[in-house]
Amino acid sequence: MKHSRSFAIFCLVLSLCLLSLGTWQIYRKEEKETLLKALEKAYTTLPQDADEVETPSLFQPLFIKGHFLANKTIFLSAKTHKGKSGVYVLDIFQTQKGQFLLIQRGWSQTTTPSLPLNTLTIEGIARVPSPPTYFQPKNTPPTYFWIDLKALSHELNLPLLPYYIVSKTSYDPHILPTDPIPFPSNNHLQYAITWYILAFSILFVFFYSRKHFLKKEKS
């Protein structure tokens, strides 16, 4: 009887965990659909002047006129492209209104890219930095692994805007522009169905074995 009770508790707890995972995948599906709609809208929206936009929306296309600042290049380490290791190249851009904006120019294998210093028009997509994951190393300047705009503002002594732009053009043949609008896959419905099937399978096995056990006890 004790063994039967332990088995029942195990099956019920495991089923609840699997049902929770399935429900979480449904929530993730809805979040991903919202994100994909925002990305699709970004492809059809005309870029606006960043100097005229106070707070850009998610993945909003922008353009900005101004110039890069010399000796302010930042490299994000441990970035790969087609199996090759390299860095993301980021530079500080001063707009015509005197605002300071971080520009992600693209991926490169070298940490000695060229920097155009003439007046330019940068076109790209507004992004808000993602928080670091648990496994991401800490930034130890001059080595960076993720974008921390507040820390960079303090280190560079510049009031950076609270977003950055992924540029469509790098202005350097050795820097490959990164995709400004990535389209992630949305397989969360399949994952949810898998978790639900596993949960109901365990419940089926539990009730079937329990029924078989009760029959055996009566005989």
Image (cartoon, rainbow, N blue to C red):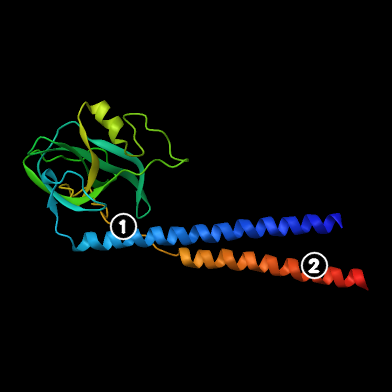
Q: Is there CB contact under 8 Å for labels 2 and 1?
A: no
Asked which secondary structure carries label 1, the reply is loop
Q: Quadrant of the C terminus?
A: bottom right
User: Which label number is shown at residue 25?
Assistant: none
User: Which label number is shown at residue 182?
Assistant: 1
The residue shown at (23%, 43%) is 164
- Comparing 116 with 93, the one in front is 93
- How packed mark 1 is, by other alpha carbons closer than 10 Å (few <14, some 14-19, many 20 or more), is few
Residue situated furthest front in the rendering: 218
Position of 146 with respect to 26 (left or right) is left
Asked which secondary structure carries label 2, the reply is helix
The residue shown at (21%, 62%) is 43
| Viewer-side label of 2, 1 | 2
Marks 2 and 1, the one that precedes in the sequence: 1
Q: Which residue is mark 2?
A: 210
Position of 76 with respect to 112 (left or right) is right
- Marks 2/1: CA distance? 50 Å
Q: Quadrant of residue 31?
A: bottom left
The residue shown at (11%, 45%) is 52
Number of marks present in the image shown:
2
Q: Amino acid at mark 1?
A: Pro
Where does the image place residue 120, in percent across and percent down from the top left? Answer: 8, 45
Q: Quadrant of residue 141?
A: top left
Where does the image place residue 97, in percent across and percent down from the top left? Answer: 8, 37
Q: Quadrant of the N terminus?
A: bottom right
130 lies above or below 35: above
Residue situated furthest right in the rendering: 219
Where does the image place residue 191, in percent across and percent down from the top left? Answer: 51, 64
